């Protein structure tokens, strides 16, 4: 893991998703509400309820985990050459449609 890595998480699809401290701080500017959910975002990548492939980009995957009734935490990752990196994470009240990759 590189020295400025914030975390690297293994996903159920067999690849890792990583982010750096500097990118995490950038993400918090756009989504300050997730600041207290760092552990939950890691859990969302490692143990999601469901994973969907983006309709717009086949290399982008959306990992969903239930926060509370009708509320999910979403971790969005891009997979390139077997590695993944976190694009964004946020709370949502709706799951976007797309191809369901996990669980099958």
Image (cartoon, rainbow, N blue to C red):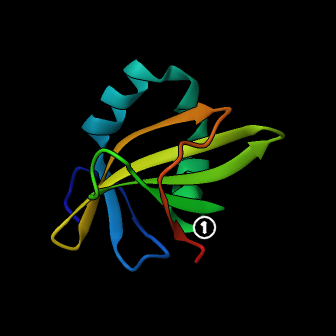
In the rendered image, residue 89, in percent from the top left (x then y), is placed at: 46, 39
Q: Kindly identify which residue carries mark 1.
A: 47
| Foreground pick, 94 / 33 | 94
Drawn side of residue 95 relative to residue 69, left or right: left
Residue 24 position within the rendered picture, expressed as x and y whole percent measured from the top left: 35, 37
Seen as rendered, the residue at the extreme right is: 69
Residue toward you, 104 or 16: 104
For the residue pair 4 and 102, the one nearer the viewer reads as: 102
The image quarter containing residue 87 is top left
Q: How many marks?
A: 1
Q: Residue at position x 57%, y 56% from top?
A: 44
Q: Specify whether 53 is left or right of 81.
A: right
Q: Residue at x 34, y 69 (%)?
A: 16
Along the horizontal axis of the image, is 98 left or right of 3?
right
- Taking the spot 32% from the left edge, 57% from the top edge, the residue there is 18
Query: What residue is at 55 percent from the left and 71 percent from the top?
Result: 102
Is residue 58 placed above or below 36 in the rendered structure?
below
Quadrant placement of the C terminus? bottom right
Q: Position of residue 52 (x, y in %)?
A: 49, 58
Does residue 14 sit above or below 25 in this rendering?
below
Crowd around label 1: few <14 · some 14–19 · many ≥20 (10 Å): some
Quadrant in which the N terminus appears: bottom left
Q: Which secondary structure lies at badge 1?
A: loop
């Amino acid at each position: 893991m590189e020295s400025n890595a914030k975390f690297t998480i293994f996903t159920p699809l067999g690849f890792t998703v990583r982010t750096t401290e500097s990118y995490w701080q950038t993400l918090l500017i756009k989504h300050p509400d997730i600041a207290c959910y760092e552990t939950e975002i890691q859990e969302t990548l490692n143990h999601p309820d469901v994973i969907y492939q983006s309709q717009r980009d086949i290399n982008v995957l959306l990992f969903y985990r239930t926060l509370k009734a009708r509320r999910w935490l979403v971790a969005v990752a891009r997979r390139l050459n077997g590695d993944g990196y976190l694009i964004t994470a946020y709370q949502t009240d709706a799951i976007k449609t797309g191809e369901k990759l996990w669980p099958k």
